[in-house]
Image (tube, rainbow, N blue to C red):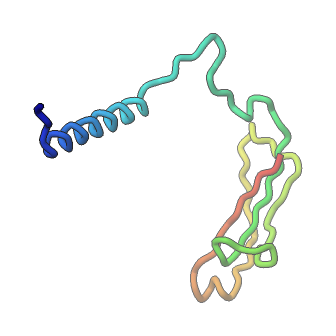
Amino acid sequence: MFFPSITTILGVAFMAYIAHSMWVMAQLFTTLQCSGQPCFTSFLSEKPRMQLALFTSTNSNPISTEVSTIFSTKNLDYMQPFQNDFQIDVPLKTRRNGSLYLQATKCI
């Protein structure tokens, strides 16, 4: 009885791996077939009430005692553009290091 060599077995396994990889990559670029309703809906289409809070800190991942509140609002109208100038106190650590982080938090 004829048995295939180890090179043939590994070659077939490698070609199957390449074919599977090509199939997975092709699936990334194909679109979903949707029924009469949209597949994805926006969270904002239901017009929820939103809150916005802006904080600064000298650390990229601060704890609650390391942040300074700049601005907060309970009723954010996200359908209108928001533009505002803020006065920010630059801490000594930022003056020495040059790093100041802004955290923006939205709440529903």
User: Which residue does the image show at 72% across and 52% down from the upper left?
Assistant: 83
- Residue drawn at x 13%, y 45% is 7
Horizontal arrangement in the rendering, residue 8 relative to residue 41 (left or right):
left
Q: How many marks?
A: 0
Question: Which residue is depicted at the point 81% across and 68% down?
Answer: 69
Q: Say if 70 sits above or below 33 in the image.
A: below
Residue at x 63%, y 10% (from the top left corner): 36
* Of 98 and 9, the residue lying toward us: 9
Q: Relative to residue 49, is residue 96 depicted above or below?
A: below
Question: Which quadrant: the C terminus?
Answer: top right
Q: Nearer the viewer, residue 72 or 1?
A: 1
- The part of the image, by quadrant, that contains residue 65 is bottom right
Judged left or right of residue 92, residue 23 is: left
Residue 41: percent from left, percent from top: 68, 27
Q: Residue furthest right?
A: 74
Question: Left or right of 17: which side holds 63?
Answer: right
Quarter holding residue 54: bottom right
Q: Horizontal and vertical percent for residue 33?
A: 52, 17
7, 91: nearer the viewer? 7
Above or below for 83 versus 31: below
Q: Position of residue 25 (x, y in %)?
A: 37, 35
Which image quadrant: the N terminus?
A: top left
Residue farthest toward the front in the current orientation of the protein: 1
Q: Quadrant of residue 6?
A: top left
